[in-house]
Image: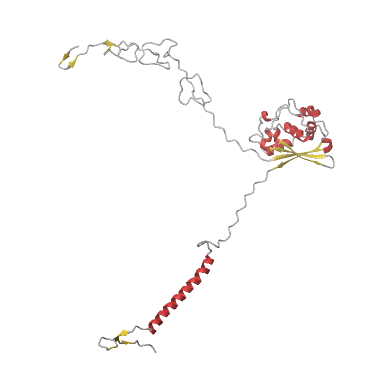
Amino acid sequence: MATVLGVVCIEPRVGCTKPIAENYDVSYNVDSGECAIKGCTDSTKLNYVPEANFDVTKGLPGYCIDVVFGCMQLSATNYDSGANLERADSCIYAPPSPTPAPPEVGTVVLGLGSSYTIAELETIDLQASVQAFLATVPPEQPDYASFSRRRLDVNAVESTVGWIADADWRVEFARRVARIYWLPRVAVSFKSAAPTATGTQMLFDISASYLPSGATVDGLKSYADTLPSSVYSSALAIPITSVSNTIEQPEADSPPPAPPSPPPDTTTTVVSGLAPGVVVAIVLPIVVILLIGGGGFYWYQLRKKKRMPMATVLPDERPVVNNQLLVQPPDLPD
């Protein structure tokens, strides 16, 4: 290396000057055009490297990867876990869930008349009648389509496997009615039992709030009307002589009563804690007294000036008698 007139001469070093190359050397200052750039040289592959001039060994990072088109969004219905490239608008999303309808309100009151008395109902063997009851339960959910009802969630219905009767006939009868209707156990409750001339009249409440979305209390009653007394006789293992179904709707909430009108305000102004009437009763006499007193004092001063005028001193030429200056008395009024 030599210096000529301040110019430094640099010896040329020919080699690869591209930093991404395998044979790059920072000391090279003239590119040889023989850089060894490792990468995927196939333009159809996912990780194609345009600058590469030889492929990476299979199994090592940078080896050519096949393109797999598909949806890569986890929330999409057509999500593909094996995809590595996504086309625009290739993902499909489920429509938003509709807003669930509010639960149906109302109750179907099921009336069952029996020739058994309440005393006889207390003595029946409930467990012995389980098999007769199970024989009346439909093996699958009835088709409620004609009654504007959708299919229920069968998981909410009490299973008949290993059915153990409740010791209380009121509770047990409500359970069996719910199972006949394919409704959850809590949907049916025993309401009352009253003695009649021919036996006992029992009432059960079947709540419409446990119906599936879209069902109505009218549809529930329509289905109840199709069940004959023989179904209840078999399910409850007692003679049923009459069946009735009525709808009860909850009473509409009445609006709250209007608040009472406030009494007239007779003390809108308060001075020092006193009502206006009290203030007037105290202040007014004082003002009158002050006015009368002031007027009287003014009149007194005027009269005083008229009755007692100032004395005048006589001129100096008046004689002095016994060393006293003579003073002319004032003119007093008549």
Q: Is residue 136 above or below residue 311?
A: above
Query: Could you tell whether 273 is left or right of 146 in the image?
Result: left
Q: Residue furthest front?
A: 322
Q: Residue furthest left?
A: 5
Q: How is the image coloured?
A: secondary structure
Residue drawn where x is 44% and y is 75% of the image: 294
Which residue is depicted at the point 70% across and 40% down? Answer: 107
Image-based side of 328 in relation to 222, left or right: left
Question: Residue 260 at what x, y percent from top left?
Answer: 60, 56
Total numbered badges shown on the rendered structure: 0
In the image: residue 274, left or right of residue 166: left
Residue 213 placement: quadrant:
top right
The percent position of residue 208, horizontal first and vertical second, equals 68, 37
Q: Is residue 322 above or below residue 44?
A: below
Using the image, determine if residue 246 lies above or below residue 291: above
Q: Position of residue 110 (x, y in %)?
A: 75, 38
**Residue found at x 46% / y 75%:** 293
| Visible residue check, residue 116 | no
Quadrant where the C terminus is found in the figure: bottom left
- The one of 44 and 193 positioned closer to us in this rendering: 193
Evaluate whether residue 176 shows in this view: yes
Q: Work out whether residue 312 or residue 62 is closer to the camera in this orientation and state it.
A: 312
Q: Where is residue 305, by image quadrant?
A: bottom left
Residue 218 screen position, x and y as percent: 69, 39
